[in-house]
Every structure is written in structure tokens, then in C-alpha cells.
Image (cartoon, coloured by chain):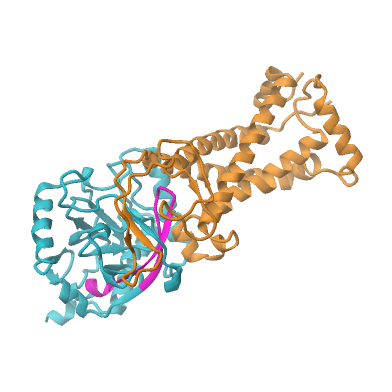
Chain colours: A cyan, B orange
Amino acid sequence: MKTGHVITSRRTILTGLTSGAGLLLAGCPDPLPPTYGNVLRMADNLTYRAQRLLLPRNSLAREYDRRDITSIPAIGTTNPANPHEGLFDAAGGAAYERLQRGDFADWRLRIEGSVTRPGSYSLSDLKRFPARTQITRHTCEEGWSAIAEWTGVPLHRVLEAAGIRPGARFVNFHAFDAIVDSIDMFDALHPQTILAYGMNGRDLPVAHGAPLRVRVERQLGYKSVKFIHRISVTDEFYDPGKLGPLQAGWAWYVGI
Amino acid sequence: MSSGHTRWVRATHWVLAASVLTLAVTGFTILMAHPRLYWGTVGNDLTPALIELPVSRNYRHGGWEVSTPAFPDGGRALSAIRTYDILNENGWARSLHFLAAWLLLVTGTIYLLAGLFSGHLRRDLVPRRGELAGRLLRNDLAAHLRPRTRPAQGGPPYGLLQKCTYCAVVFLGLPLMVLTGLAMSPAMTAAYPFLSGVWGGTQSARTIHFCVFVALMLFVVIHLVMVSLSGFRRQMRAMTFGKLT
């Protein structure tokens, strides 16, 4: 019976708890990202372990009022179809340009990996899920911050629909500009972690990651990957090499 | 005659010195990525700054594509695309900053606990009752302004201004740095909103973090000047190997 594999909200939380316990217990398979022998990465992992151990699991990032919304710079990739961007992927750029011309009607989000029902979702499929709107602070590693309103589907609802397997520990986001980045199940199942298709009361603008971006509110801005087209769920840390933040010189966990 | 610096004071002094130096260099590198300071919860290139520091080529860099309203119903909130390739070394600078911060936190805690239980803080650092009289402070200040400095004792007892300065660094400066630093962490502030609330927001905390950094660097400079004036080699020997003979 298929229903035997359906992961309900409750089981999702249990899965999260088991991954969490595994994170803190010695002897369990180590789910920490690799350090490549780099001392800097060891400190990053220490921060990761300490925050996961000491901070309340489901504390919410502060949410603001509409009148608190501020100006917000668009940085990093602001159009994956532009070959002059710092990060550009020819195939991804061509696909993005075609989809953008069609107003993203043909865009689909693929979900695969450690899930019982891999599949793909159109924007209207995603909009049929119960939506969440949150006005939160975006904190950039550069030092600035901004407040904006984000509307989207909580990631945990999409993961429940796809049926995450009990061994699943990481959720990876693949973007049109070839960026790949991941978060752990703690953040993936957090109620404020959403796949946002709306910003400040309208469709997500291209410069801010259209048609879909992640919002990970308890980490720095660069974890909120823009322009995503694929989500892969993995049991182990997936190392995307130079496409990921780690080997490009950036910390993987940035709750600090 | 001084009894010299105890072994744990010497050890923690040098570890803390190394972490403060690392924190200063990496902190300044992080500041260079965005040399604008703000007051309140948020601030960015599209909002007014409290102070702009001319410390990197990012200073007033310009390079913004035409701004569009961030709101459909207008309003003052804007969104603009950055076209300028900023100087940003935060990849290593942030990680190294936090590595040094861990070292400071652990060593600082050891120092405070050892200092508390050994009586070092009470005996050598905190000014005694009656010592904080205006006349005594004025006398010690006048003594510091004289061209000749007394040769180093190589440890406690410390002078009055020396005690006050060390107390300010140990009980005020460094704890403020840790607290305002934590107030910038998105995970920490989600868990404990008062961490940034007490400073009036994360950007206020960042500004205070910078001001206290300046104060601490001023301390380091004066500290090194005093060490040099009172006999650099003797002082270094005392802080590294212990009692002067």
C-alpha cells in the first residue's frame, strides 16, 4: 500500500527529531558537511553544532508589519539569462530565457531524491498549497539588511506531499545560475522556511529570484537560493563542488 | 616588589591577544565589504547611513541600476540592481572571525572563572574602596603625563588608571563585543529577540560593535605604548616567562 509511506506532519516532525538526535550523538553517521581539512570549516561546524544543540528548535524569526518594509538591494545573480553575470550557466541561462518569455507558465519544480513520490510542480500547483505570507528581515553577509514581505508555500508542505523518507537529512536547491546549496532538516521543516513566489504583494521579480526562491529566515541571505528549478532530498551531505558555497570559500551553515 | 604574572594569566593573556588581533583584522575586512553604519533594525545601500567610512573601494561605490518601487502601491521603498562588483573577502574573513570569536569566548571564560576563584580579579584588577577618589585619579593621570615612566614591575600590583583600564576592557569592552556580535546572528536573534532588542536593532548592534572595536584598538595602542615606555623587553619577559629576577 502506498499510504504506508505517506509521511504526515507528525511523522515529518519525528523524522526531523531523529535527524536532530543523530546530529548530536557521537557514533551516529556524521551528518556534518566536509571540512576538507580546513580549520575555518571546523569553526563553522562548531557553530553549527552549538546552535543546533543550544537554540530552541522552532523559534520563529521576528515578523514585521507592512509599514516596516524597506528598500532592498538586488545583488548576486539578478538575471540567470544574462551571460555577463558573475555566475552564468549556458544551458540554465537558455532555459531560463525561454521560460521567462512564456511568463514561467512552462516552468516546473522537480522534486527528487530521498522521497517516496518524486515529481514536478508547476507554479499553479504550488499556489494550490496553503500559502504563508511573512514580513521578515533579510540579513546579508556583507553587513546590510532589509525588510520585505514574502509569500509562498511552506517547504514542509511540499516535502510532505513528496513523502520524505526517514533517512533524509538534507534538502538541496538547484538554481538556473548553476548554484547548488543545501539546508538540513531542521531548517527545511521550519514553519518560516518557504518557497516564495510572491514579494511585497506581487509576483516575485526576476531580480529577486523569479519564479521561485527559498526563504530560510534563520540564516544569512545567501542561503535563500534564488531561481530554483529542482529540489533534491539526500540522506548524506551532497557536495556540489565549485557550484556550492563550501568550495567557493563560503560557510555552509550561516545562522551566525 | 611584584610577585609576577601567574602561569594562567600569562597563558590566557597571549591566547586572548592572538584572538583579539585576529578578530580585529578579520572584523575590519568584513567592514570593508560594507563600510556603512546604521541605527535601528535595518539599513542598506538604498537607505540613509549614519556614518560612511572611507575604508575600501566600496565607499560610496555607486553602480545601481534604475530603482523600481519595491511595493506595487508605490511608497518610498525601492529595489535596485547592483551593477558594481564590490570588494568582498567575507568568505574567509567571516569564518576566521568566528573561529577567533570561539577562542575568545572559551579563553575569556577560563580567565574570568580563574580570576574569580583565585582572587586575581578582586585583588589585582578591581580598584579598592577609597582608591577611586578624584585626587588619586588626578595624581595618577599626572604621573602618566610625565616624560619618565617607572620601570616595569612585571606584574601586579597595578596602578590606579591601569586597574580602571583593565576593568573596562575585561568587564565592559569584551563582553559588549560578544553581546553585540551575537545580536547580529539571525539564528540567535530568532531564538532570543532581546539580544538585538536591547541595542535597538541589529544594525544598532553592528554600529556599537564597531565603536567598541575602535575603543579596544585605542586600548591596545596605549597598552603597547605603556609596555614600551616601562621597558619592553622586561615586560615581554614577565608576561611570557613569569617572575622577573
Q: Count up the numbered dots.
A: 0
Tell me if residue A89 is in the magenta stretch: no
Q: Residue at x 29, y 74 (%)?
A: A12
- For the residue pair B129 and B113, the one nearer the viewer reads as B129
Q: Residue at x 20, y 73 (%)?
A: A163
Q: Is residue B158 visible?
A: yes
Q: Can residue B242 be seen from the camera position used here? A: no
Secondary structure, magenta segment, majority class:
strand
Placement of A10 over or under B126, stated as above or below: below
- Relative to A252, is A118 on the left or the right? left
**Left or right: where B91 falls relative to B43:** left
Q: Position of residue B28 (x, y in %)?
A: 49, 38
Place of residue A193 in the rendered image (x, y in percent of width and height, measured from the top left): 33, 67
Residue under the point 39% across and 70% down: A135
Q: Which residues are magenta?
A: A134-159
Which of A27 and B110 lies nearest the eye of the viewer?
B110
In depth, the one of A116 and A61 nearer the eye is A61
Quadrant of the image containing the N terminus of chain A: bottom left
Residue A185 occupies quadrant: bottom left
